[in-house]
Image (spheres, helix red, strand yellow):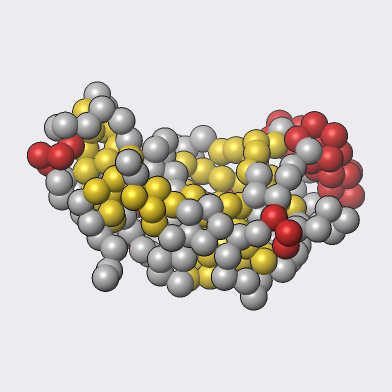
Amino acid sequence: MRNTLTSFFWSGDAIRSRSVSDIVLSETLDLPTPSTAVLADWQREIEVRLALEPGDVEVMPLARTQMRWPDYRRCVQAMSEWTVALGLPAVLADSDMALMGCRGARYHHDGEQYGGNAFCNLFLSEDKGLDVHFPLTGQRIPLKRGTAVIFDPVQPHGVIRRGSDSFSADDFAPDQDFVQIFLTWELPIEDADIASALKVDFDIAPETSLQLDKEQLWSNGSPAAVCPQSGRLLPVD
């Protein structure tokens, strides 16, 4: 049976409902290679301060990267040109940017915090043999330097080894580099251009919205969670 997903999210001071998009916009952009100093700084941050374990996704120090790698501006410019070409003018300029690092990512949905957003990610690392995988739709995007994606973060997703169909910590051996560094922007899902690009429909369950006081994902009319290993939807008690 097909899963009908509904995101309940904060819109101002009220909970609003919307459909969950299965569209993933993706392109490979021409980006400069990070400098040796920046790569060394990222490695120190990951190993010493963050101690990233398999499946972890953490914030990296953006200001230090901006200072040590002036060419990062070319990355932002490439992303801006791509989003404009998609018919999304000024969305990056109006959104906060963050630098993130992940060592794979367990399957999850972000509907408990980011139901009001679309995610826009630009990957800065070389190909480590990882894909972002959307288990309910079967879509897989190989991650490498220049991979750009815009997607609905409430759609279950994870970052797994290429060739695998599940997340396992055993796939991320401690003596191998599986870390991906990426820039990310949170785009407002209620923006007309973004909603149109992802084909999101709003107010699809208005009566249920009135009964809720927190953001959440529902599947086929009931609250749902995501199995972190398989990506399957699970009922919430």
Name the residue located 48 percent from the left edge and 59 percent from the top edge. Answer: 231
Name the residue located 29 percent from the left edge and 45 percent from the top edge. Answer: 223
Horizontal arrangement in the rendering, residue 58 relative to residue 158 (left or right) = right
Horizontal arrangement in the rendering, residue 48 relative to residue 99 (left or right) = right
- Asked if residue 53 is positioned above or below residue 129 in the image, the reply reads above
Residue 98 visible to an observer of this rendering: yes
Viewer-closest of 122 and 116: 116
Name the residue located 60 percent from the left edge and 38 percent from the top edge. Answer: 98
Quadrant location of the N terminus? bottom left
Residue with the most extreme left position: 207
**Residue 161 location (% of width, % of height):** 67, 66
- Asked if residue 185 is positioned above or below residue 26 in the image, the reply reads above
Name the residue located 84 percent from the left edge and 44 percent from the top edge. Answer: 43
Total numbered labels: 0
Residue with the most extreme top position: 13
**Residue 105 location (% of width, % of height):** 61, 52
Viewer-closest of 230 and 33: 230
Quadrant location of the C terminus? top left
**Residue 8 location (% of width, % of height):** 27, 41
**Residue 154 location (% of width, % of height):** 39, 50
